[in-house]
Image: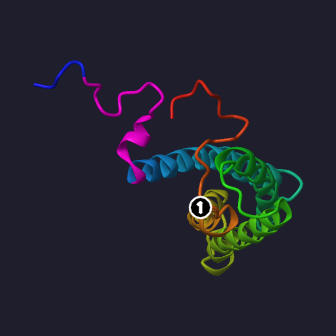
Amino acid sequence: MPDSTQAAPDTADDVTPARRRGGLGRLVDTIWHEVAKFGLVGAISFVIDLGGMNLLTHTVLEGKPTTARLLSGVAATLFAWFGNRSWTFAHRRSRPVHHEVTLFFVVNGLALVISTACLVISHYVLGFETRLADNIATVIGIGLGTLFRFWTYRRFVFANEPMDVDTSPLESDDSPT
């Protein structure tokens, strides 16, 4: 039985669970928080992207799904830049903002090409020309582009090791980590 006069290790109020678990625990916590934040920003971007494409193809760009897809993708990318820069990866700073934004838009341009290629192949090559088929191809393309984006954001765009403290404006001191 432990001596009650000795303090139990790692029970100080200022020690977070991630610190108690060590380096691997901190890595898992960091990745989990990044995935969750990236997912939320991505979900909103997805609504902007798919909703924008449908709005455009049902109105001013009827019969032009590729143009609508590109325009909605650009709008979603602008939202994603602000969300990921200021919240998801705010704790990662490795280069000046103009380098990050250039890399971000190059990566998103490639992801937009991936997702648009899925739509083009479905619509023009395979002949699936219904709006449902266009939406399914777009969702598949966005999914593939999202996997590509998350990997490249972590690897190249916001590549620096995470700081100990999340400095994003949406992260409060009272929230659990």
Seen at 56% across and 64% down, the residue is: 147
| Residue 25 image position (x, y, % from top left) | 40, 48
Is residue 150 part of the magenta span, yes or no?
no
Q: Nearer the viewer, residue 134 or 111?
A: 111
* Res 148 quadrant in image: bottom right
Q: Residue furthest front?
A: 5
Direction right: furthest residue: 60
- Counting from the top left corner in percent of width and height, residue 102 is at 82, 68
Q: Give the residues in magenta.
A: 6-23
Q: Is residue 19 magenta?
A: yes
Q: Is residue 132 left or right of residue 177?
A: right
Residue in the image at 43% along x and 42% along y: 19
Residue 42, x across and y down, in percent: 64, 50
Q: Is residue 95 above or below residue 40?
A: below
User: Closest to the observer: 12 or 135?
Assistant: 12
Q: Nearer the viewer, residue 80 or 165?
A: 165
Q: Quadrant of residue 71?
A: bottom right
Which quarter of the image is occupied by the N terminus? top left
**Magenta region, mostly helix, strand or loop?**
loop
**Badge 1 density bin: few <14, some 14–19, many ≥20, Cα 10 Å:** some
Q: Amino acid at mark 1?
A: Phe
- SS class, disc 1: helix
Q: Residue at x 28, y 28 (%)?
A: 8
Residue at screen point 57% across, 27% down = 175
- Disc 1 designates what residue? 150
Residue farthest top in this picture: 4
